[in-house]
Amino acid sequence: MTDFRTLAVRVLSGPATVVAFCLLFVPFVLGVFDARLMTPLAAPGYTVLLTMTAVGSRLVPYDLWIYWVPFLAACYVVAVAVGGLYYGFRLAR
């Protein structure tokens, strides 16, 4: 049986979590720097940013840079959920 601590570390920082975070974050950030790089791969990150912009505008309505903090946090939470599902299915097998 897998130790809970090992599983928690894998879910929080394992390869599946890192890949999911990079798939949400990197295509969107590349599109922010150069609009020609905004591909359909950026759509999930863009959706997360739109949602977190609503949260950020409620918290601090005038500072635009603050929107990136909830965006990064939401990307990480989604990546941890994906990583947790991946490792959960892998353990169930």
Image (cartoon, rainbow, N blue to C red):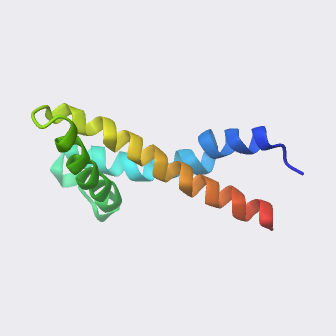
Q: Quadrant of residue 65?
A: top left
Q: Can you give x and y, in whole percent of width and height, for residue 25 in the image?
A: 37, 46
Q: Residue furthest front?
A: 58
Residue at 25%, 46% in the rendered image? 55
Residue at 55%, 54% in the rendered image? 81
Q: Quadrant of the C terminus?
A: bottom right
Q: Residue furthest bottom?
A: 93
Question: Is residue 8 rendered to the left or right of residue 66?
Answer: right
Q: Examine the rendered structure and indicate whether residue 15 appears above or below residue 81.
A: above
Question: Is residue 91 rendered to the left or right of residue 18?
Answer: right
Q: Examine the rendered structure and indicate whether residue 67 appears above or below residue 36.
A: above
Residue at 28%, 45% in the rendered image? 30
Question: Is residue 10 rendered to the left or right of residue 93?
Answer: left
Q: Can you give x and y, in whole percent of width and height, for residue 79 in the image?
A: 50, 50
Q: Quadrant of residue 89?
A: bottom right
Question: Is residue 84 rendered to the left or right of residue 5?
Answer: left
Q: Residue furthest right?
A: 1
Q: Can you give x and y, in whole percent of width and height, for residue 29 in the image?
A: 29, 44
Residue at 32%, 40% in the rendered image? 70
Q: Can you give x and y, in whole percent of width and height, for residue 78 in the image?
A: 47, 53
- Count of marks, rendered view: 0
Residue 33 visible in the shown view: no
In this view, the residue in front, 74 or 61, is 61
Q: Examine the rendered structure and indicate whether residue 65 appears above or below residue 73.
A: above
Residue 93 visible in the shown view: yes
Q: Examine the rendered structure and indicate whether residue 64 appears above or below residue 85.
A: above
